[in-house]
């Protein structure tokens, strides 16, 4: 949350309107997915990938800077650190189906692999060796 606050604050100062947020533990991001999300949904404030089970990927998403900055400040002050608290109710949102839409740009859905545990590192190593 602090990282988001820092980047949003600086981008707001520079006059940017939207931010593409990417987690630092996602080593296999496909640029095609970023392009698809960035250029096909400009009319929405938020653009967020969503799995068919309803789980969203808030650390691989587009956020409106001003609205999200306000939400981050509120979340930090109230110690509500769940990232789904950042979604401003008044803003427009586009949830993109990972299994139905994004898969067209990343057929193995490697973009959404996270490295959080030791076994995740082993999985990543195997994927790298396959290439």
Image (tube, helix red, strand yellow):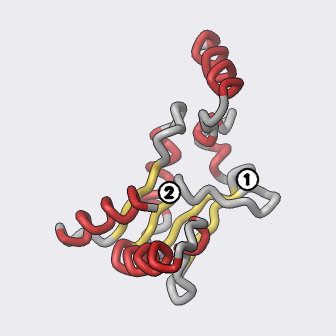
Which residue is drawn at the image coordinates 50% and 84% (left, top)?
91
In which quarter of the view is residue 111 placed? Answer: top right
**Which residue matches tag 2?**
37
Q: Is residue 57 left or right of residue 90?
A: right
Residue 124, percent across and down? 62, 22
Which residue is drawn at the image coordinates 61% and 38% (left, top)?
114
When the figure is inspected, residue 32 is found, relative to residue 92, above or below; the finding is above
Helix, strand or loop at label 1? It is: loop
Which residue is drawn at the image coordinates 59% and 71% (left, top)?
94
Q: Residues within 10 Å of mark 1 (few under 14, many from 20)?
A: few
* Of the pair 10 and 39, the residue shown nearer to us: 10
Give the farthest residue toward the top.
129
Give the farthest residue toward the right.
53
Residue 45, percent across and down? 46, 75
**Which residue matches tag 1?**
100
Separation of marks 1 and 2 at Cα, in angstroms: 14 Å
Residue 71, percent across and down? 46, 78
Q: Residues within 10 Å of mark 2 (few under 14, many from 20)?
A: many
In which quarter of the view is residue 115 placed? Answer: top right
When the figure is inspected, residue 45 is found, relative to residue 52, above or below; the finding is below
Helix, strand or loop at label 2? It is: helix
Q: Reading the chain from its start, which is encountered first: label 1 or label 2?
A: 2
């Amino acid at each position: 949350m602090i990282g988001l606050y820092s980047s949003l604050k600086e981008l707001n100062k520079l006059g940017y309107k939207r931010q593409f947020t990417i987690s630092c533990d996602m080593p296999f991001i496909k640029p095609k997915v970023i392009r698809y999300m960035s250029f096909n949904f400009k009319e929405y404030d938020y653009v967020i990938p969503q799995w068919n089970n309803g789980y969203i990927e808030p650390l691989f998403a587009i956020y409106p800077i001003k609205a999200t900055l306000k939400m981050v400040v509120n979340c930090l002050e109230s110690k509500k650190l769940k990232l789904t608290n950042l979604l401003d109710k008044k803003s427009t949102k586009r949830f993109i189906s990972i299994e139905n839409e994004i898969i067209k740009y990343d057929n193995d859905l490697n973009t959404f692999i996270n490295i959080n545990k030791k076994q995740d590192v082993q999985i990543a190593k195997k994927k790298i060796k396959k290439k």
